Image: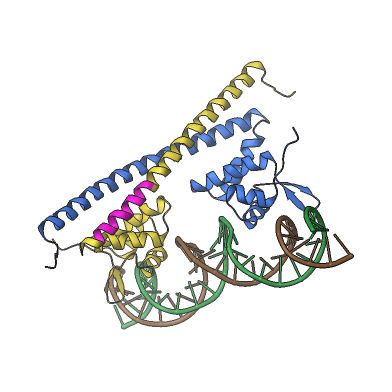
Chain colours: A blue, B yellow, C brown, D green
Amino acid sequence: MPEHYLTIRQMCDAYDVTPRTLRFYEAKELLSPIRQGTRRLYTRRERARLKLVLRGKRFGFSLEDIRQLLDLYDTSGQNLAQIERAHELAKERLGDMIRQRDELTVAIDDLRQQMEWGAEVMASLTSKSTTAAE
Amino acid sequence: MPEHYLTIRQMCDAYDVTPRTLRFYEAKELLSPIRQGTRRLYTRRERARLKLVLRGKRFGFSLEDIRQLLDLYDTSGQNLAQIERAHELAKERLGDMIRQRDELTVAIDDLRQQMEWGAEVMASLTSKSTTAAE
DNA sequence: AGGGAAGTTGACGTGCACGTAAAGAAAACG
DNA sequence: CGTTTTCTTTACGTGCACGTCAACTTCCCT
């Protein structure tokens, strides 16, 4: 089957980004669609990379961070040192992410408690008086 | 005991931020230190608020988001509607945070698998040949 | 063939979160 | 009392991640 390409607009619709964003990512060497004349055509590889970019963004990585990770990611079939390096970076990232998740968990619990407290306040206010104006 | 104040420099050292940052936060109405003449003095309240600001930032909230939350947080002794509103916002935030944590969990698992795969590749390379140059 | 839709390259603008340099006032120290 | 820090305001600069025209080509369709 003949590797089916997407135009820039199809990409935009599929991933909810603007053309500007895709060209910007290309300028930053995050994507490199093939050219048919002057037009851009996006392969399966580019789609995969875009997904990774958008995902990375959701986790607060900068585009430059993401570029380096992507580069490691697909050049790391080269030699052992590269793979070990990637492995190290991955471990660091993993640590970051776990720490971040733990912080989130704490914050979630805090917020839950706050909400319970708020609910109690609301309850006491509604039961004692409707016009709590004193 | 006489509520012990901190100067701007002491704040900077304590929370690892620059004076510029503290003044910037003040301009954005996140902090409002008292003035002794022209000098800023930071109370316990300001310290608590700064902690919340820095925490919010780590979770990717914008300063404007944080300001609104702080405002709700300490004006929400006012009336029931305010508290209910705060409660609603808190629920939304909670949802966001839980979703974010779930995404993180998935990403962590992905990364773990990637790392296992990487470890396997490394293992096969090291056992088969030290100079994998063919 | 002609005309609108889609795509292209500049290039300048924007919002956010500060950095940084200039110039002056105030406090602290020897 | 002078001088050296510390702090102040004012203001312009910066990096990131795009948004927003403008001015063209290029496709596609009837």
Give the side of residue A12 with respect to residue B43, left or right: right
Q: Residue at x 61, y 47 (%)?
A: A14
State the image coordinates of residue B104 (x, y, percent, origin top left): 45, 39
x, y percent for residue A18: 61, 56
Q: Quadrant of the C terminus of chain A?
A: bottom left
Q: Nearer the viewer, residue A79 or B55?
A: B55
Which residues make up the magenta segment? B82-95
Q: Position of residue B21 (x, y in %)?
A: 41, 63
Give above or below for C19 relative to C21: above
Q: Main secondary structure of the magenta part?
A: helix
Q: Nearer the viewer, residue A10 or A73?
A: A10
Total number of numbered discs in the rendering: 0
Question: Is any part of residue B76 visible from this angle?
Answer: no
Placement of the N terminus of chain A among the 4 image quadrants: top right
Q: Quadrant of residue A72?
A: top right
Q: Is residue B89 visible?
A: yes
Q: Residue furthest top?
A: B128
Please give the name of the residue rendered at 66% of the width and 20% of the height, measured from the top-left corner: B130
